[in-house]
Amino acid sequence: MPQMSPMLWLNLFALFLLSFFCFMILNYFILNPKKAPGTIEASLSKEKIWKW
């Protein structure tokens, strides 16, 4: 089996790194975090009583 030259290994490594970074960036921007239910309603329903 012939060996790969170091330049080909470097190209292969760069290709895998580039694909890994693209995969991670796409996962970061595609997935929207789920907000806990009731957090917005709970903050809006509380009335602040100011005593001046």
Image: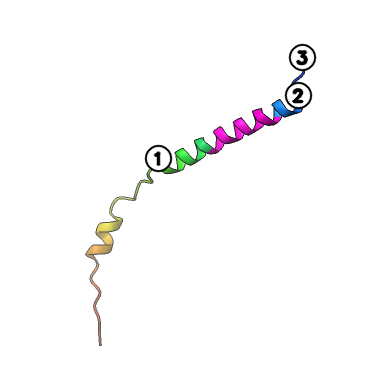
Q: Which residue is denoted by mark 1 in the rendering?
A: 30
SS for dot 1: helix
- The residue that mark 3 highlights is 2
In the picture, residue 15 is in which quadrant? top right
Where, by quadrant of the figure, is residue 6 drawn? top right
Looking at the picture, which amino acid does disc 1 mark? Ile
Of residue 22 and residue 30, the one placed in the foreground of this image is 22
Name the amino acid type tagged 3.
Pro
Residue 48 in picture, x, y percent from top left:
25, 74
Of the two numbered discs 3 and 1 in the rendering, the one whose residue sits closer to the viewer: 3
In this picture, residue 38 sits left or right of residue 6: left
Q: CA distance from mark 2 to mark 1?
A: 38 Å
Q: Give whichever of 16, 37 is nearer the camera.
A: 16
Q: Secondary structure at mark 2?
A: loop
38 or 5, which is in the foreground?
5
Q: Position of residue 44 (x, y in %)?
A: 24, 63
> Element under label 3?
loop
Outermost residue on the top side: it is: 1
Which residues are drawn in magenta?
Answer: 10-21
Q: Using the image, tell me which numbered label, if any, was put on residue 5.
A: 2
Disc 2 marks which amino acid?
Answer: Ser
Q: Mark 3 to mark 1: distance in Å?
A: 41 Å
In this rendering, the answer to whether 38 lies above or below 43 is above
Name which residue lies at 25% across and 81% down: 50
